[in-house]
Amino acid sequence: MRIERKLILAVVALIVLANLIYPLAALARAQDVAHNGFESNGTLISGWHWLRNSGHTAKWTFNATALQKAKSGTVYLNFAPLVTNGVNGGSGYSTICLVTVQGVKTEKYTIKLVNPYRPIDPEISSGVGYQCYGHTSQSIPASIWKGAGTLTITISYPFSNDYHMAVNANAMSIGYSK
């Protein structure tokens, strides 16, 4: 009888704890806006558009209505492209790219792309070690997205060190807090 009572109390305690934690998850403030359009004139290879020649660009469009309730100072571009040092390039390369953000007005921002892969190796890696990650160096001000129906994000070759970058539709997102 004593073991049954302890078991019942333990189950009740778990239920109470779960009910306390669940509402906290529902209050999460960080949000993500996915693209609703993507186009690129880069060379398409295995689902990635390689921006490696003058005139190569990529453009994402986002429905900005989700941002209208964003807290000012919390809107950032998050970017996850592939980067290498040249055609059939090597692993571990990072770069900096310039992005144009067009909403109510147009501004340019930099994104420092970090490649955590090691070693940095200039020899052909067949795609191993190309993945980079980065975000805008500052938040996108409300003066760009407040009242905008759409945000358009554009990047163009060349990038720092003339490295090659590959993008796809899911490589760019917008993060914000409510």
Image (cartoon, helix red, strand yellow):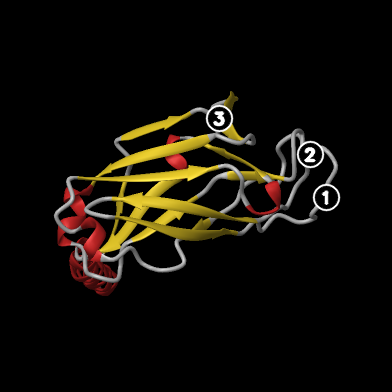
Mark 2 vs 1: CB contact within 8 A: yes
- Residue tagged 1: 121
Q: Position of residue 5 (x, y in %)?
A: 22, 72
Residue 88's tag is none
- Number of other residues with Cα within 10 Å of mark 3, as a class: few under 14, some 14 to 19, many 20 or more: many
Tell me if 40 is positioned left or right of 42 in this view.
left
Q: Find the distance from the CA under tag 2 to the CA under tag 1.
A: 8 Å
Q: Which mark is residue 125?
A: 2
Q: Which residue is mark 3?
A: 42
Instruction: Tell me the distance, in whole angstroms, between the alpha carbons under discs 3 and 1.
Output: 24 Å
Single out the mark in the foreground, 3 or 1.
3
Q: Secondary structure at mark 2?
A: loop
Amino acid tagged 1: Asp
Q: Residue shown at 26%/75% (left/top)?
A: 2
Quarter of the image holding residue 6?
bottom left
The secondary structure type at the circle numbered 3 is loop
Q: Secondary structure at mark 1?
A: loop
Residue 116 quadrant: bottom right
**Badge 3 amino acid:** Gly
Which one is nearer the viewer's eye here, 173 or 6?
A: 173
Whether residue 28 is visible, yes or no, is no
Coordinates of residue 33 in the picture (x, y in percent):
29, 49
Kindly identify the residue that appears in the image at 28 percent across and 66 percent down: 141
Q: Is residue 128 visible?
A: yes
Give the mark nearer the N terminus: 2 vs 3: 3
Instruction: Give the image location of residue 10, x and y in percent.
Output: 27, 71
Q: Given the image, on which type of amino acid does mark 2 rest?
A: Ser
